[in-house]
Image (spheres, helix red, strand yellow):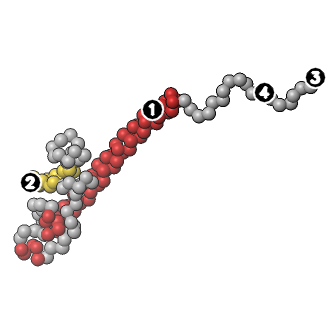
Amino acid sequence: MTRSLSRRRPNRPSRRGFTLLELLLVLAILVVLGGFVLTNFINVGEGANADITTTQMNALKGNIQMYKINNKAWPETLEQLRDGPSDPAKKARFTPIISEIPTDAWGKPITYTLNGNTFELRSGGIDGQMNTDDDLVVTGP
């Protein structure tokens, strides 16, 4: 009696590839993970835009204070930081503080409100609407 050195294959069929159920399960997991990643990525971007806008408004606050020091009065509008005071005598010796009026990170204008000896810079925030919960505000003395 001689033994065969070759191995016999089992009688069951060999599996090649994945079943439809396995593919659907993997696809569902990828969709759920993608949703989490996309949601977190969007939130990080909006937080960065808020930080950028707050930084721009703080720089603008410094420009407004510089205008006050140079002209002995607060600017009535942000345009005066670029164009100078409305008084022709003061305008003749005015040096522009900024070259253009900045916007927030969403491309919307920053509003400037002067109230006596204090001022407020306001951005509409993510929704672009003023006087809502997501507004960004910087105040001056």
Residue 1 x/y as whole percent: 93, 22
Residue beneath disc 2? 116
* Residue drawn at (92%, 25%) of the image: 2
Q: Considering only vertical position in the picture, is 23 above or below 51? A: above
User: Can residue 4 be seen from the camera position used here?
Assistant: yes
Res. 8 mark: 4
Q: Considering only vertical position in the picture, is 61 above or below 46? A: below
Q: Badge 3: how crowded within 10 Å, few (<14), some, or many (20+)? A: few
Q: Earlier in the sequence, mark 1 or mark 4?
A: 4
| Residues marked 1 and 2 touching at CB (< 8 Å) | no
CA gap, disc 3 and disc 4:
18 Å
> What amino acid is found at the position of numbered circle 2 in the picture?
Gly
Residue 103 x/y as whole percent: 22, 57
Residue beneath disc 3? 1
Residue beneath disc 1? 28
CA gap, disc 1 and disc 4:
39 Å
Drawn side of residue 12 relative to residue 65, left or right: right
